[in-house]
Image (cartoon, rainbow, N blue to C red):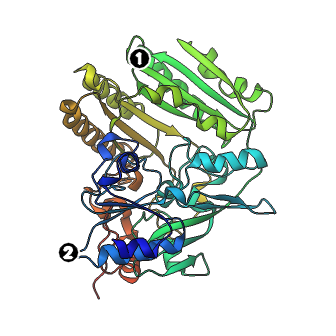
């Protein structure tokens, strides 16, 4: 370890480092925390190759995990007895002079990006939540609130800088290391550590209409009918997340709509496009919609509710083809039944993203490693527990419910969309995550990581010659 310290400018933390080590282990979910042997926080890109050499040079080699934002609810960014390369010090965000692109280091949160874009009056396709890491979000595809107008984060990625398993630091784009660039756009973190992303920027999409529209669960059928009608006139400039949750203080099953309305200069667009939800056949039990000046403000909109949410969190999710009433009603019934079982798990929720898929289908399925380019949406199940004893039940609930969604959607649409890598846990079949791209991804893995140095996350086996 002394030799490693002499080779890097960054920080090395061990269990003997006390509070700093404990803080470095924290993740968005308490279920994601593991006790690493070392946590290394690189100060430069050149700090990383010696860490890789140190870990792979041990007998036996030490597992390497990479922590960007740490938002994933699996243990992909943690290691039990291995080395965590914590990118938190590599979080610089730099806007190009012409404001047409923005460079983001791999340890940045989307909130770091939005701080810069808000001041510069530009926008970029990113996460709806500020505390999500840029790296993991992007490598899995990057479905964001601006995707309706501008596509996915990977569709706006111009280039990247990657530290490879053999210690080389390379730039990748459509022209440089094109196989690597293809793979990191939807193939996950299996090919190297992406220490810098360069994204295309866009003219400001704000001000944004944002807020909450909530209904009692007894109105589900009516709300689903409103959604069906609303979708027929929806444009890429408005979207929402539909939540099944039990908000305080009554904790009754509720339907919560969280809208984002782009280009809402004076609030009039929100009034117009959200009118069916506010003035239609069903009146909301609670409503608060206002105008936010920029996406930095929007990304903090859930801070208060998340501050009190149970931290024992398991998330799984999948794709679905449409807002079929039969699908959502069946999921509602299963969710209500589960959250009725105990107060310990009533914080569990189901999220459905309704962002127009019009832009994402413009990219060919072979152009990136993302396997689904037909019209689709994504959903997630959050299993939250207030006690250790209730964690197994919450995990089983999340797994069984997303399996049901996948099967029911296949039945109703005739299309099996498989799994969403960013909402997977690593136990799913790789062909169900990567589809027809798996053989090519295995070849890219063999080229850039034949010894499986990157063995966390959704592991891709290198192709055998």
Q: Residue at x 36, y 78 (%)?
A: 53
Q: Label 1: how many residues lie within 10 Å, few (<14), some (14-19) or many (20+)?
A: some
Q: Residue at x 28, y 67 (%)?
A: 63
Residue behind mark 1:
217
Q: Residue at x 36, y 70 (%)?
A: 438
Q: Which quadrant of the rendered structure holds the N terminus?
A: bottom left
Whole-percent x, y for residue 339 in the image: 28, 23
Q: Label 2: how many residues lie within 10 Å, few (<14), some (14-19) or many (20+)?
A: few
Pick the front one: 451 or 80: 80
Q: In terms of sequence position, does the residue under pointer 1 or pointer 2 come before the other?
A: 2
223 up-or-down from 49: above or below: above
- Residue 22 is labelled as none
- SS at mark 2? loop
233 up-or-down from 66: above or below: above
Q: Residue at x 53, y 65 (%)?
A: 43
Residue behind mark 2:
60
Pick the front one: 379 or 229: 379
Whole-percent x, y for residue 306 in the image: 46, 30
């Amino acid at each position: 370890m002394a030799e490693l310290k002499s080779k890097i400018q960054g920080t090395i933390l061990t269990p003997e480092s006390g509070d700093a080590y404990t803080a470095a282990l924290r993740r968005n979910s308490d279920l994601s925390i593991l006790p690493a042997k070392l946590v290394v926080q690189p100060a430069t890109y050149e700090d990383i190759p010696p860490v890789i050499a140190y870990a792979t040079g041990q007998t036996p080699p030490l597992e390497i995990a990479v922590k960007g934002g740490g938002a994933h609810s699996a243990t992909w960014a943690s290691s039990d007895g291995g080395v965590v390369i914590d990118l938190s010090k590599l979080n610089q965000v730099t806007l190009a002079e012409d404001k047409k692109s923005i460079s983001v280091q791999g340890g940045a949160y989307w909130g770091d990006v939005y701080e810069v874009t808000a001041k510069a009056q530009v926008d970029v396709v990113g996460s709806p939540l500020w505390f999500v890491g840029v790296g993991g979000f992007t490598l899995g595809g990057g479905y964001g609130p601006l995707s309706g107008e501008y596509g996915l984060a990977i569709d706006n990625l111009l280039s990247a800088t990657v530290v490879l398993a053999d210690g080389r630091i390379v730039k990748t784009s459509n022209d440089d290391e094109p196989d690597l660039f293809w793979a990191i756009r939807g193939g996950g973190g299996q090919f190297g550590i992406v220490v810098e992303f360069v994204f295309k920027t866009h003219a400001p999409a704000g001000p944004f209409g944002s807020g909450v529209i909530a209904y009692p669960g007894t109105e589900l059928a009516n709300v689903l009918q409103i959604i069906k009608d609303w979708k027929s006139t929806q444009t890429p400039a408005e979207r929402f997340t539909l939540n099944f949750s039990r908000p305080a203080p009554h904790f009754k099953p509720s339907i919560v709509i969280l809208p984002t309305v782009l280009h809402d200069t004076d609030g009039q667009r929100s009034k117009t496009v959200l009118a069916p939800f506010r003035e239609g056949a069903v009146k909301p039990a609670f409503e608060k919609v206002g105008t936010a000046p920029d996406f930095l403000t929007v990304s903090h909109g859930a801070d208060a509710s998340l501050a009190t949410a149970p931290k024992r969190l398991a998330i799984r999710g999948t794709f679905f083809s449409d807002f079929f009433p039969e699908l959502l009603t069946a999921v509602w019934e299963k969710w209500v039944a589960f959250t009725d079982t105990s107060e310990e798990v009533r914080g569990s929720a189901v999220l459905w993203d309704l962002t127009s898929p019009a832009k994402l289908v413009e990219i060919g399925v072979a152009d990136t490693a993302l396997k689904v380019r037909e019209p689709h949406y994504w959903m997630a199940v959050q299993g939250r527990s207030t006690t250790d004893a209730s964690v197994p039940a919450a995990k089983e609930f999340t797994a069984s419910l997303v399996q049901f969604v996948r099967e029911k959607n296949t039945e109703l649409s005739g299309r099996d969309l498989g799994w969403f890598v960013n909402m997977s846990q690593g136990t799913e079949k790789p062909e169900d995550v990567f589809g027809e791209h798996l053989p090519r991804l295995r070849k890219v893995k063999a080229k850039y990581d034949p010894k499986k140095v990157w063995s966390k996350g959704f592991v891709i086996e290198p192709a055998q010659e």
